[in-house]
Amino acid sequence: MISHQLLELEQSIHHLSLEDKLWLLDKILEQVRGTTEHQETTNPPQTLQYDERDD
């Protein structure tokens, strides 16, 4: 379920100018990239290993 705060935020974004929306998008992307980079350094990607035995 979407929180009331997110719905309010969406409505506020709707009223922004295109320039402000692009600025906000850039800031969000920076944060997502930072979060992703942090996760990759603390939790390195895992490789899957398959068991090829026939059961």
Image (tube, rainbow, N blue to C red):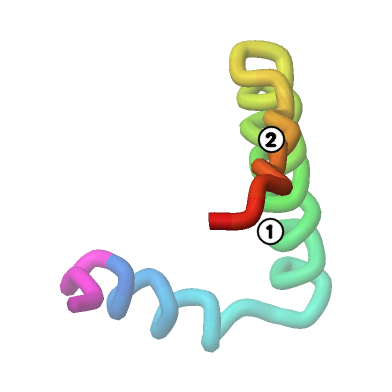
Residue 47 lies, in percent from the top left, at 74, 33
Q: Earlier in the sequence, mark 2 or mark 1?
A: 1
Query: Residue 10 bears which disc, if any?
Result: none
Which residue is outermost to the top? 42
Residue 25 in magenta? no
Q: Which residue is tagged 1?
A: 24
Label 2 vs label 1, nearer the camera: 2
Residue toward you, 51 or 36:
51
Residue toward you, 33 or 19:
33
How would you classify the magenta stretch by its main secondary structure?
A: loop
Residue 4 in magenta? yes
Taking the image as shown, residue 42 lies to the left or right of residue 23, namely: left
Instruction: Report the amino acid beneath label 2.
Output: Thr
Residue toward you, 6 or 53:
53
Residue 25 lies, in percent from the top left, at 73, 62
Mark 2–mark 1 distance (CA, rounded to whole Å): 18 Å
**Which residue is painted at 53% across and 87% down in the image?**
14
Q: Which residue is tagged 2?
A: 36
Mark 1, secondary structure of its residue: helix
Q: Residues within 10 Å of mark 1 (few under 14, many from 20)?
A: some
Mark 2, secondary structure of its residue: helix
Residue 50 lies, in percent from the top left, at 70, 44
Up the image or down, 44 lies above or below 2; here it is: above
Residue 26 lies, in percent from the top left, at 79, 54
**Which residue is painted at 69% across and 35% down in the image?**
36
**Which residue is painted at 63% across and 32% down in the image?**
35
Q: Residues within 10 Å of mark 2 (few under 14, many from 20)?
A: few
Please provide the residue range marked out in magenta: 1-5
